[in-house]
Image: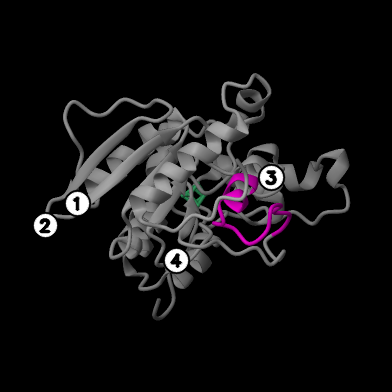
Amino acid sequence: MHGSHPTPQTRSFPLVTAPRLDSMRELDQTVSTCRACPRLVAWREEAARVKRRAFQDWEYWARPVPGFGPPDAPLAITGLAPAAHGGNRTGRIFTGDPSGDALYAALYDLGLASQPVATHRNDGMKLFGVRITVPVHCAPPDNRPTTTERDTCRPWLARELELLRPTLRAILVLGGFAWQALLPVLTNTGWQVPRPRPAFGHGAHAQLTDARSERVLHLIGGYHPSQRNMSTRTLTPAMLRDVLHRGADMADVPVHRSRP
Ligand code: SF4
């Protein structure tokens, strides 16, 4: 971005700022300065002040958590929002909580991540052909952003998807809330969503077309690797690997499967 940006305390900050950002690097840096949602700013900072007992020695990130992964990834993965003591602590999305542990292990098993365990934004992790992001960049109370917060944050994801657009072929959407949050963003960024709107489910698949060309974007649903889904075996590690594998295949990202 060139020049100074508006004071990041108003709800219009993402709307005004995001379209001006010309690179993923600028986007990632600028997202992390956002303070547009008062309730979420208070919550993310409160979590950092109170901390969990296990993380007393940590200096929490306590800011919006940007997307992670190469800016030319053919496959995107979206959750809903960072966790208060996960991404909000470590500064990297899906890093530092049980959901992230399951997701990065699956990515590693398929050769899509350089390490099986993600611990912190400076742990050296690399993703290959995959970018992980969220429609809401700040940790919300009870993992539930309000509709206003979701809409306020939307321009960041819209810009991210525009920057990814030249290479993007598939999006794996983890969880029904993320699915609901993502569809309007895709419509706003020029993808034609089938009607009736495709319903979320594990393995759900929809093909979106580019309003301006013949390009197709595959949307794949997958259960969120939440602690609850994993402990009840609603989602098993094998199911998570399979749905990831499917997303990678649709995006033409090579997979090197290391586990049966
Ligand atoms: S949720 Fe999004 S819009 Fe709201 S403060 Fe965080 S980064 Fe900004």
Residue behind mark 4: 27
Visible in this render: residue 151?
Answer: yes
Magenta span covers which residues?
Answer: 105-120
Quick one: label 4 or label 1, which is nearer the N terminus? 4
Q: How far is mark 2 from mark 1, CA to CA?
A: 8 Å
Going by the numbered disc 4, the residue's amino acid type is: Leu
Q: How far is mark 2 from mark 3, CA to CA?
A: 39 Å
Instruction: Name the residue at 52% across, 68% down.
Output: 29
Q: How far is mark 4 from mark 2, CA to CA?
A: 24 Å
Percent of width and height locating residue 212: 11, 57
Quick one: label 2 or label 3, which is nearer the N terminus? 3
Frontmost residue, 14 versus 97:
97
Q: Which mark is residue 86?
A: 3
Label 2 secondary element = loop
Q: How far is mark 4 from mark 1, CA to CA?
A: 20 Å
| Ligand 1 neighbours mark 1 (CB distance < 8 Å) | no
